[in-house]
Amino acid sequence: MVHYNTNKTPLPPWSAAGGTMQASILLDETTSRTFTNLDAISGKVIVRSTKAADVDDIVVKLEGESRTRLVNHLGPNGEKMKPKLEFHKILYRTTTVFPPPTLAQDRISTPVSGKPSYTLPPGTHEYRFKFKVPFNNSCHEPAPAKSSLSKVGISDWGIEIPVIPTHHVKKTLPPTLGGFPGEAEIRYFVKVTVSRHSFLKENPRAYRPFNFLPIESPRPSPTGSQVYARQRHVFHVSSQAAEVSKKGKMKSMLGIAADATPTVTSTGPANGLAVSVDARLPEPAILTCNQNIPLTILLKRVNYSSEQVSLSSLQIMLRSSTKIKADDMSRTEQSSWIIMSKSNMGMAVTFKSDEEGAEAVIDDDLWRSHILPNTIAPTFETCNISRGYSLDIRVGLAHRGSTSAGKQQVPQSIILPLRLDCAIFSGILPPASVLERMAQARDTFGDAPPYIASTIGDGKLQAEAALSGAVSRPANDASTSQTAPPMPPRPDQGGLHAEEGLADAPPSYYDAVAEVREEDLRRSEKSGW
């Protein structure tokens, strides 16, 4: 027991409920700390009571929620539609910090009428707690009945109750997600509840949110190739340039603003400078938080020409596509982050020669110093929210124009858009022991499918596909011979139960991570935060 006035640590706001009893949570780590899978979240619960109070227990919970809410403003007949809600408890862990296990056991062994309660003396009481963040989500596991009350909401439409979801995805815990107020949210928090023995007294509660960023999955081996997006453009030559110039003078005489750099298009054969622009990323296209972008921008001559082109502008932007689902409704929200943007550059592009196929690589110093923002959530998929990314590159080219063979080119400029689909990784590498265990499993079992299905429907694992891949026959089996007659399925091989067939399958990556020992996990600075 620690007296309230001697506690030098600044306490967070006390819970308003409880009257003579208040509760708060203090985490050992700072509030700005970002947690990841297999991290230990520890702290203490502080309960302050001005007089003795009877309590049943003090329970600390580690929770994660994924909420979505979509609204159709008008129905088919113009009527006002109720919003659709979907709620998933993706993380739920509990621990009882009071009463202690020995005290609770003694009280249970002693005959007591009714539900046992414990008297908490007046003063300030502290109780330690510690959780280990799991690897996979747990929304497919049955949640306690009391947690359903937190899903109910009240709005202009009345009481809003989410439907019971029948589809779950068992994957890595998704990152903390915001930016869609009232529509979609993924949040993690630690909560404490002091259960008062009296039904007429409100239970004091406290709440402490925290940020979460998952460990990234094993990266596929580099293939040595590149993924690319390409655009081609021809700077046209027109013999009507003089006529266009006269029209510009006539507009200026009449007080009409003429175009500063008229772009002339030719209906005849295009025999001007033709170039193609490539934006390339190493395959597989993966970007990492808090690191630079391994982008290559390449220009190539498509025809023979001695004319020159210059880089006038360059913009690199990351676009996200967040798919939000609520019951039978879905919506895709778009967001963007500008990585770098430059204009009025006037940087000459130097080709190796004037021949067709000559290439020029844009200096990557233009964007190498611009790292991917560390506040961007990595690519993820959960039951009702998923997010993907693409990299948008806008390359501005300018041609000063020239006169040859009686034909004139006016100055032209063009912006060529390029888009590359990519994945964002958090930059938090899995423990080395997990990667070694997975490598050993691949050497032993080969590339067999994991025995844990990623999709769970109607509360049951869809294990048939994994079972067919996990159960195999020897190569010299008589049933595999071409001359042998067909045989009915045998219970000892083809008729195995799911549990028996799945037991022989190699462990998946997620199981290997979930079984990692705490001392094997090397805590390092989160590269993505």
Image (spheres, rainbow, N blue to C red):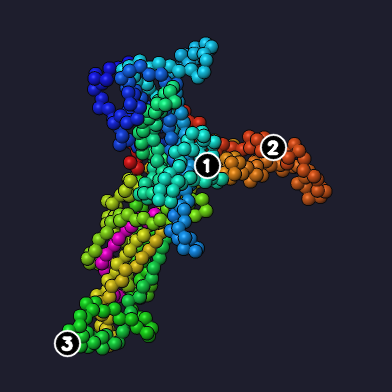
Crowding at mark 2 (Cα within 10 Å: few <14, some 14-19, many 20+): few
Question: Who is closer to the viewer here, 175 or 433?
Answer: 175
**Residue under the image location 40 percent in, 38 percent down:** 188
Q: Which residue is mark 3?
A: 253
**Residue under the image location 32 percent in, 65 percent down:** 395
Above or below for 396 versus 468: below
Q: As shown in the figure, which amino acid type bears the numbered disc 1?
A: Lys
Query: Is there CB contact under 8 Å for labels 1 and 2?
Result: no
Above or below for 520 versus 105: below
Q: Which residue is mark 2?
A: 497
In what quadrant of the picture does the N terminus appear? top left
Nearer-N-terminus badge (3/1): 1
Above or below for 149 versus 229: above
Highlighted magenta segment, given as a residue range: 305-320
Cα–Cα gap, marks 3 and 1: 71 Å
Q: As shown in the figure, which amino acid type bears the numbered disc 2?
A: His
Cα–Cα gap, marks 1 and 2: 22 Å
Q: As shown in the figure, which amino acid type bears the numbered disc 3?
A: Met
Question: Who is closer to the viewer here, 274 or 161?
Answer: 161
Q: Which disc is residue 170 wearing? A: 1
Crowding at mark 3 (Cα within 10 Å: few <14, some 14-19, many 20+): few
Left/right of residue 119 with respect to residue 408 in the rendered view = right
* Kind of element beneath mark 2: loop
Residue 464 quadrant: top right
Q: Main secondary structure of the magenta part?
A: strand
